[in-house]
Amino acid sequence: MANSPQAKKRARQNARRFDVNKARRSRIRTYLRKVEEAIAAGDQAAAQAALKEAQPELMRGVTKGVWHKNTAARKMSRLSARVKSIGA
């Protein structure tokens, strides 16, 4: 348990950051799920549109420190390859 004033403040900050980051992660996952659903439906146009919407959200998560840049790059690469393979 935090006893010193700075430890108490840090605990409050951590709780706030946790809530913010949780919301960001959830938002990113929602965008990624939309791409996955479009891929599963076999609709390439919808999948490309969803991917285009998901990309900035994913990169925003990187700049905010929610995800590592390589993780985001890997996810984007794999998703774009799957969207591309729908038409083939």
Image (tube, rainbow, N blue to C red):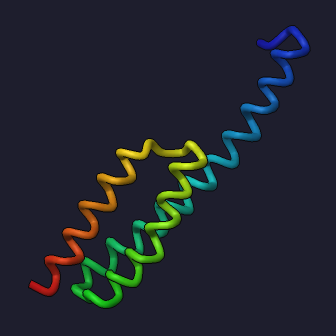
Foreground of the two, 27 or 79: 79
Image coordinates for residue 71, horizontal then vertical, percent: 36, 46
Does 68 appear above or below 47?
above
| Image quarter of the C terminus | bottom left
Residue 7, above or below 54: above
In the figure, 68 relative to 25: above or below? above
In the picture, measured across the screen, residue 44 lies left or right of residue 56, that is left
Of residues 88 and 21, the one nearer the viewer is: 88
Classify residue 57 as left or right of residue 88.
right
Name the outermost residue toward the top: 3
Which residue is located at x 28 percent, y 66 percent? Answer: 79
Among all residues in the image, which is located at the extreme left? 88
> What residue lies at 39% left-to-right and 52% top-to-bottom?
72
In depth, the one of 50 and 38 nearer the eye is: 50
Report the residue at 32% width, 56% height from top.
Answer: 75
Q: Image quadrant for the N terminus? A: top right
Q: List the single residue furthest toward the right.
A: 5
Residue at point 49%, 58% (across, down): 59
Q: How many marks?
A: 0
- Report x, y in % for residue 81: 20, 68
